[in-house]
Image (cartoon, helix red, strand yellow):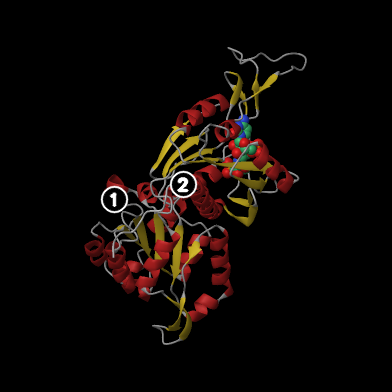
């Protein structure tokens, strides 16, 4: 079986002697069914020619940030969006330093900044450069952002020294990409994810809302797509690019989100409610912009429908996962919501102090009837993949309990 069938892999090559192994890596990736596009730094082209990589990948190789011909065909933003995963192999000490500092001074560094795809960094450098505290600090920063490090291996180096800093062998890199990426654990499973805030208008230009950026929900949708699910993302107003191969339904208010989620509920197997739906809306929305008064005004609010509870109490509910955003009593409040809302699972996050709302990081405690798991603090992309692993396990267990068909009888000999 091809482990990377149709997976869109952007292979970034930076300038080190190990760049010669990228040719073999490209072949092995294609053997596994991956679609490969190669981006090289200018220094990498000193070690191996773009023509070699073009022949092996079957696609033009990209080297220039300001290449007018390339921009017309596939510019850096398109490349960044195209990729399911970006693999930098080899990643030199210099490239790792540029990545850790968020520089955008060549095509490869720029599209690493512009992408929402997972980044896998495969270092290769002299052992002393690898051990240098500056490199180690850069690596730690990248890992804190959720970037995956593959290797390095240890052994004899091209410079004649021995130690850590060797590029992993192409087969090891392919195996690690297969393990880190799309797992097919949810192949054919229909997953609906809600994300972002809602806006409850009080007049044509003013609304009640919250600080949700949508990042957590989008990361969950991406993780579900990586696991092979057919994903529908119902999103409130956010400034994010949706993940690849995810069907998107845009809504604004809690009422619209309610209608969209209910309309899709019958055709989904798993519902994950990461949206920060407003609990209240104004009883009336003024037709025209409200005039400033000399005195204060009183806004009369009414409750919005609890979408999550409604889904969980349907006659044939999907596997239902809620989120709980709490500033205090995280565990007690989350467990209470799990029971009261009749959920299969809840992911609780303590919000505030730079975590939760409108932040790249989060900390999740996951509860289900009879169990829990702490995922600690990490980048939302990483947490979303870990959460998806727990959802897959619990969903399978529940599905197997609901299946009462007799076991198939094997008549082969
Ligand atoms: O978007 P980010 O900036 O990345 O931030 C992520 C997040 C903090 C918004 C996210 O991780 C999160 O916690 N989302 C749920 C926020 C929330 O509304 O929590 P709650 O405890 O108020 O609601 C509990 C659950 O009920 C949630 O799953 C919510 O989607 C759902 N709900 C709430 C109200 C309502 N009217 N209908 C609902 O379905």
N-terminal-most mark, 1 or 2: 1
Disc 1 crowd rating (10 Å Cα; few below 14, some 14-19, many 20+) is some
**x and y percentages locating residue 38 in the rendered image:** 32, 60
11 or 249: nearer the viewer: 249
In 3D space, how far apart are the residues under numbered discs 1 and 2 (Cα atoms)?
Answer: 53 Å
Q: Position of residue 375 (x, y in %)?
A: 61, 56
Marker disc for residue 161 = none
Report which residue position mark 1 lands on.
70
Identify which residue is drawn at 50% across, 44% down: 218
Q: Quadrant of residue 204?
A: top right
Q: Is residue 118 left or right of residue 367?
A: left
Q: Is residue 96 left or right of residue 359?
A: left
Badge number at residue 403:
2
Q: Residue at x 45, y 65 (%)?
A: 121
Residue 92 percent across, percent down from the top left: 44, 70
Query: Residue extending furthest right?
Result: 295
Q: Give the quadrant of the N terminus.
A: bottom left
Is 363 located above or below residue 52 in the figure? above
Q: Is residue 252 visible to the viewer in this orientation of the structure?
A: no
Name the image quarter holding the C terminus.
Answer: bottom left
Vertical side of 31 occupied by 409: above or below: above
Q: What percent of the width, then of the height, locates residue 118?
A: 45, 55
């Amino acid at each position: 079986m091809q482990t990377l069938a149709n997976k869109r892999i952007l292979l970034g090559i930076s300038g080190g002697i190990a760049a010669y192994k990228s040719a073999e890596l490209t072949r092995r990736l294609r053997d596994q069914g991956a679609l490969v596009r190669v981006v090289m730094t200018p220094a990498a082209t000193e070690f191996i020619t773009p023509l070699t990589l073009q022949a092996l990948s079957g696609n033009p190789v990209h080297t220039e940030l300001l290449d007018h011909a390339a921009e017309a065909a596939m510019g850096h933003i398109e490349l960044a969006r195209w990729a399911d995963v970006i693999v930098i192999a080899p990643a030199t000490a210099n490239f790792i330093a540029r990545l850790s500092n968020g520089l955008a001074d060549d095509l490869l560094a720029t599209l690493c900044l512009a992408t929402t795809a997972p980044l896998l960094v495969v270092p290769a450098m002299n052992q002393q450069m690898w051990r240098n505290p500056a490199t180690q600090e850069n690596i730690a920063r990248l890992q804190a952002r959720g970037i995956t490090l593959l290797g390095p291996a240890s052994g004899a180096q091209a410079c004649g020294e021995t130690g850590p800093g060797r590029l992993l062998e192409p087969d090891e890199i392919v195996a690690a990409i297969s393990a880190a990426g799309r797992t097919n654990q949810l192949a054919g499973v229909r997953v609906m994810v809600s994300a972002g805030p809602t806006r409850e208008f009080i007049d044509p230009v003013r609304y009640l809302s919250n600080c949700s950026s949508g990042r957590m929900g989008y990361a969950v949708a991406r993780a579900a797509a990586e696991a092979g699910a057919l994903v529908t993302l119902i999103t409130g107003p956010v400034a994010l690019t949706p993940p690849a191969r995810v069907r998107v339904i845009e809504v604004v208010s809690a009422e619209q989100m309610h209608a969209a989620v209910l309309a899709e509920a019958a055709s989904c197997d798993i519902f994950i409610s990461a949206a920060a739906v407003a609990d209240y809306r104004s009883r009336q929305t003024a037709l025209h912009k409200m005039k400033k008064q000399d005195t204060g005004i009183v806004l009369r609010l009414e409750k919005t429908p609890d979408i999550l509870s409604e889904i969980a109490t349907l006659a044939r509910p999907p596997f239902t996962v809620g989120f709980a955003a709490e500033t205090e009593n995280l565990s007690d409040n989350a467990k209470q919501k799990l029971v009261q809302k009749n959920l299969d699972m809840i992911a609780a996050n303590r919000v505030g102090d730079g975590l939760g709302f409108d932040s790249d990081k989060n900390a999740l405690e996951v509860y289900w009837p009879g169990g829990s798991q702490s995922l600690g603090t990490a980048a939302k992309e990483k947490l979303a993949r870990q959460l998806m692993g727990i959802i897959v396990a619990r969903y399978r267990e529940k599905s197997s309990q609901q299946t009462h068909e007799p076991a198939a009888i094997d008549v082969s000999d």
